Image: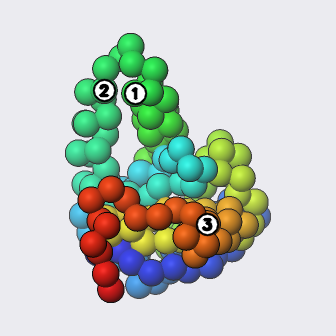
Amino acid sequence: MFQGASELNLDVKGRMAVPVKYREPLSLPSQGKLILTAHREGCLLMYPLAHWEPIRDKVMKFPALDPAAAVWKRLLIGFAEEHVLDGNGRVLLSPELRKFAGIERLVMFIGQGTYFEIWNANAWDAQLKSLTSGAAGLPPGTENFSL
């Protein structure tokens, strides 16, 4: 279970050092293979390969002529890249993925259970403001949710 948030800096080559506590859990399910891809909200997603494959298989079954399905397929499959952590626990964020997410130097690394979101730090701050303002609301079916 990946949870928690970390503020990280990219190095000059665009590499992100994954926090030590996540390196082994990320590497175990898929012999170290990770998938990085784009999300429509402007962040990146990072999955261990074993967690990505069922999602990829579902996306590949989307109807080819459906415009909404095509957008998701272009993002999720079109931007998908396979990576491994280097010997120092870093992963390269490609120029294409950095451009998509508006990432230059400072990122937020956010655990989401079976994957991580990687946000431009300013975009993440905007997400938090939206969430804490109440504008986002609760998703359908969770109206009776309480903490």
Foreground pick, 39 / 81: 39
* Horizontal and vertical percent position of residue 7: 62, 78
Q: Disc 3 and disc 1: Cα gap in Å?
A: 26 Å
Where is mark 2, residue-wise?
Answer: 62
| Measured Cα–Cα span from mark 2 to mark 1 | 6 Å
Residue 71 in view, yes or no: yes
Quarter containing the N terminus? bottom left
Real-space Cα distance between discs 3 and 2?
30 Å
- Residue 27 point in image, percent of width and height: 33, 67
Is 68 drawn above or below residue 5 in the view shown? above
Q: Which mark is residue 100?
A: none
Find numbered disc 2 in the image and state the secondary structure of the residue it sits on: loop
Identity, as a three-letter code, of the amino acid under mark 2: Phe
- Numbered disc in front, either 3 or 1: 3
> Does residue 20 lie above or below 45 as drawn?
below
Q: Residue at x 45, y 81 (%)?
A: 4
- Taking the spot 32% from the left edge, 34% from the top edge, the residue there is 59
Disc 3 vs disc 1: Cβ atoms closer than 8 Å? no
Disc 3 crowd rating (10 Å Cα; few below 14, some 14-19, many 20+) is few
In the rendered view, would you say 106 is above or below 58?
A: below
Q: Secondary structure at mark 1?
A: helix
Residue 146 figure quarter = bottom left
